[in-house]
Amino acid sequence: MSFWHAYALPLSQTSKPVKVAIGALGGAHKAFKLQTQTDSLTQSLAQSYEIASIHQYNNAIRVMQEYMNSPDKDFQVILTCCLIFICTENLYGRYTNVSRHLEAAFSLLNACDRWDLAKFMENIGPSLCGLASDLFFYVGDNHSSKLVSEITEWADKQDPIDLEEPGEPFTSAQAAAAALTRVETLCDVELYADCPDCSNDGVQCGDGGVVCKRRDKGLVSEAFYHHWSARYHAFKKTFDPSKASESELFRFKVLELEETTWQATFKLNHIDEDLETADCIEILKKAEEIIKMTQSDKGQIFTFQANLVPPISYVIISCQDTSVQWEAVRLLRCLGRREGVWDSRKMADIYTNMINAKTNKLLTWEDIPADVPQLTELLGSLKM
């Protein structure tokens, strides 16, 4: 990722907070890799590494707090550390702490002069928005209202997109991915931000006070998606897979998966409806193509942002065909990745219990919440 090579690693040579934060991230990653081993000796070693890495992380937080009180503090250093801390918390699986670091990051983004840090913002903005979108899908209605408020303010400050202009083809898959993150953020704001026309006492602005007019009309972000899609299709005509680097080809394949997922979503009349089975099968097909590209014998892999686990999970909670659901679970087990807050193995276990509970009539399809924390709590309350 360009952010790490362009900012994080160079800053670690001159900035103590960034250097210590990267050291803590490395310790957490080592502990994470060891935790996936099954023999008792390695498990014991993993626990020792985790304890040591937590000490490193706590020290990095302390160094950052001292730096925040310095008159010479630099926004780039602080935001870079926020991003590193988010990665570290993802490795620990502590999504509530991820949310707090994202709140701090967007609060800083909203406070600083984006023109002075234009290039830096161009790199870190999409990264933070992508992490926030991954988190929102994971926690659903358990989201932080402060984080939603900060992201809404951030989105409102961005340069407007003229939907009447067709726009130039993207110059790279990475540029297309960054632009798609903008669409995801607009969708998040629509889904989670409070409607200004609805009252605080629960009466909504639509028919009879029981629906929100804004949400009942469908997602405004769909128009922005179609604008993005036109530019992406123009880029695809010039993209030659045989000449692309491995990372660029991976990014391109992920974009194809994301495009398929968005197209399936925008077919729905309402966001709570199930996806069409044919679309679910196509999503899984594209996901499997990427899995075959990325499989290795290096054990569980951690990635910064979630590209594969969320769309596969989306299929499971949006398709009642059990054969499709089991195929999605199979892919999660093959994947062996933790993508941000999304752990493929843990999600495979959760969805296995969900499918079995539904098959055994311990719950209905309507009982199943979309977000992971509520689903985990519900399954834990059942006598299985």
Image (cartoon, rainbow, N blue to C red):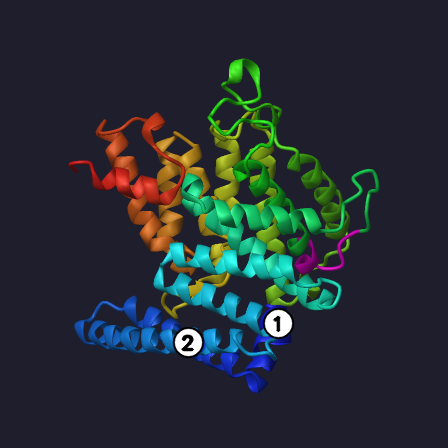
Q: Per the image, is 172 magenta?
A: yes
Q: Secondary structure at mark 1?
A: helix
Using residue 167 as the reference point, say whether residue 321 is left or right of it: left
Give the camera-side residue of 369 and 316.
Answer: 369
Give the camera-side residue of 17 and 249.
Answer: 17
Q: Position of residue 168 (x, y in %)?
A: 82, 51
Q: Position of residue 186 (x, y in %)?
A: 62, 43
Give the camera-side residue of 73 and 43.
Answer: 73
Q: Position of residue 358 (x, y in %)?
A: 27, 31
Q: Which residue is mark 1?
A: 76
- The amino acid marked with disc number 2 is Arg
The stretch in magenta equals 169-176
Q: Judge whether residue 291 can be spotted in this image.
A: yes
Q: Which residue is mark 2?
A: 62
Identify the residue at horizontal 44%, vertical 45% (top origin).
143
Q: Judge whether residue 257 can be spotted in this image.
A: no
